[in-house]
Amino acid sequence: MSVRLETEHLILRPFEAEDAEAVQRYVSLWEIARMTSRIPHPYPDDAAAEWITSHESQRASGREHTFCVVLKSAPEAPIGACGLRFLEKGNWEIGYWLAPEHWGRGLATEAAKALVVYGFEKLEAEALNSGHFVDNPASGRVLEKAGFAANGIARQWSEARQDFTDSNRFLLTRETWEKARSLNEETGA
Ligand SMILES: CC(C)(COP(=O)(O)OP(=O)(O)OC[C@H]1O[C@@H](n2cnc3c(N)ncnc32)[C@H](O)[C@@H]1OP(=O)(O)O)[C@@H](O)C(=O)NCCC(=O)NCCS
């Protein structure tokens, strides 16, 4: 089943083969790869196309939901990726990256909030997890704005850095999310 989500400025849709060129270009950037756990640097030729091909089996397994981020105003051009990955029963991890020319406009926060709703409403998550390397405070802000709370420190591997780095872990439980949602409904926020 292919899912499409909408936010104020974004469409989150499945990746298609034609998106490979943009993905290859963006994830080859050090400023993106170094902030992620799994993207190698240098990024191998054709790896984006292989990654997109792998989404079919991801979808079939139901354990990973990856979305291509496009602007509603320019829907033909991918500007990022985001998704949810199954960790263990009821627990999913969210992740995202955006092209640097689109940073600082609240777009990652829009995407993260859409993933949160999808995780709780469609994947029946009990808790959503995420984290960011300590030298990436912008991602911490994205998580806070999406409702997550700090949940300790981990020591995580970065493929790009080829090293372990301290990572601030974040958690959003269904209970916290539901309370915040009913409060927002009461106050009209
Ligand atoms: C992290 C990333 C997704 C943020 O995307 P974005 O669209 O710029 O995020 P938003 O605009 O929604 O929010 C960014 C917030 O971080 C804040 N911020 C930016 N740089 C910051 C810094 N150096 N220190 C503290 N806060 C910072 C912004 O002010 C904003 O917060 P505000 O709305 O309270 O002002 C983007 O920089 C990115 O793709 N980075 C590379 C890949 C990556 O880090 N992925 C996440 C891995 S955990």
Image (cartoon, helix red, strand yellow):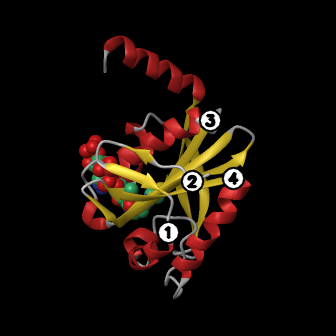
First reached walking from the N terminus: tag 2 or tag 4 = 2
Left or right of 51, for residue 132 = left
Judging by the rendered image, the residue that carries numbered circle 2 is 2
Rendered location of residue 12, percent (x, y): 43, 52
Whether residue 133 is visible, yes or no, is no
Quadrant of the rendered structure where residue 78 is?
bottom left
Which label sits in the foreground, 4 or 3? 4
Q: Pick the residue in front: 138 or 72.
A: 72
- SS for dot 2: loop
- SS for dot 1: loop
Rendered location of residue 56, percent (x, y): 64, 64
The residue lying at 40 percent from left, 62 percent from top is: 80
First reached walking from the N terminus: tag 3 or tag 1 = 1
Type of residue at label 2?
Answer: Ser
- SS for dot 4: loop
- The mark total stands at 4
Rendered location of residue 85, percent (x, y): 63, 52
First reached walking from the N terminus: tag 4 or tag 3 = 4
- Quadrant holding the C terminus: top left
Type of residue at label 1?
Answer: Glu
Mark 1: give few (<14), some (14-19) or many (20+) Cα within 10 Å. Answer: few
Judging by the rendered image, the residue that carries numbered circle 1 is 16
Quadrant of the rendered structure where residue 175 is?
top right
The residue lying at 32 percent from left, 13 percent from top is: 187
Judging by the rendered image, the residue that carries numbered circle 3 is 127
Left or right of 95, for residue 32 = left
